[in-house]
Image (spheres, rainbow, N blue to C red):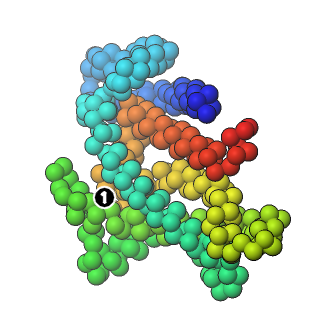
Amino acid sequence: MITFILKRLGSGIVVLFVVSILVFSLLYVSSGSIARNILGDQATPEQLAVKNAELGLDQPILARYFSWLTGALRGDLGASWFTSEPVASSLATRIPVTMTMVFVAMTLIAIIATLIGVAAAVKRGWVDRVVQIGAIIGDSIPGFVIGIILVTILAIQMGFFPATSTIAPGVGADAWALSLALPVIALLINGVTGGAQQIRSAVIKQLERDYVRTLRSRGIGEREVLFKHVLRSAAPAGLTVLSLQLIGMLGGVVIIEQIFALPGMGPLAVAATSQSDQPVVMGVVMYTVVVVIVVNLIVDLLNGWLNPKVRVS
């Protein structure tokens, strides 16, 4: 197991390295007018030259990349070209908001999708049809549309929740709960139906296996067969689906946070991308890639714990 973890961590480091090169190269192409964007159209050529030298934009791409890489390995991601705020500080204040929202939404999706998916697989009646119809509707409606509807009805018209975030340094847990309630509901509605559909399919596939009929023929109760054997065998497929949903959710929260004015990673990523703020964009991308690598590692470990064949392989 330790060897497996070390191999996955090694491959994750390679992925980080490759992604950093690709993103840095793409940003290099669009960094020609950064100095003018910062200083304005009235800046003189001498001022632009000084600013380019200050930001290191007058250096070759390899020198700039290795300068960024050596700093990143020390934990220094640089500072924003436009606000001069350290990137690490910006991420530290925004990551808790985004990750709290994603963690709560994924936890609820995992619980509700599992319950609905198992019920749809066991009860092949109206529950099954509702889940399949809900999956089609859920996949066809973007999360930001659901967010706008929730804001319009529950926040603006009914006043149950704040229309914009009240999260700020030093606020209590009640402000966090009220501000994150609607975004979590939007992510939940958008993700639970698809997860339930996949879990339903995995459970049905296991219920049709020969070992289930053997267990039933031995007089083992249906509840024990379902929760002790079928769910354990279907769990790897469900975990894979949920991990993909989580990774996709990291991209979806960008728009959700914009709609609800949450001080998370979304607004930071949008602002940095529109300004070609290279240090901030690199920090956001590296953070996202690290989360993806960690999620995949955790899913692989859980699959190995649930499935002996995976541990052997």
> Residue 268's spot in the image, x, y percent?
35, 44
- The picture quadrant where one finds residue 76 is top left
Going by the picture, which residue comes out furthest to the bottom? 126
> Residue 187's spot in the image, x, y percent?
46, 64
Relative to residue 177, is residue 81 depicted above or below? above
Three-letter code, disc 1: Ala
One can see residue 124 in this view: yes
Residue drawn at point x = 23 percent, y = 59 percent: 173
Residue 135 appears left or right of 213: left
The residue nearer to you, when weighing 102 against 50, is 102
Going by the picture, which residue comes out furthest to the left? 170
The residue nearer to you, when weighing 47 against 102, is 102
- The picture quadrant where one finds residue 141 is bottom right
Residue 222 appears left or right of 150: right
Q: Name the residue under label 1.
A: 261
The residue nearer to you, when weighing 309 against 179, is 309
Relative to residue 64, is residue 205 depicted above or below? below
Residue 127 appears left or right of 106: right
> Residue 286's spot in the image, x, y percent?
46, 34
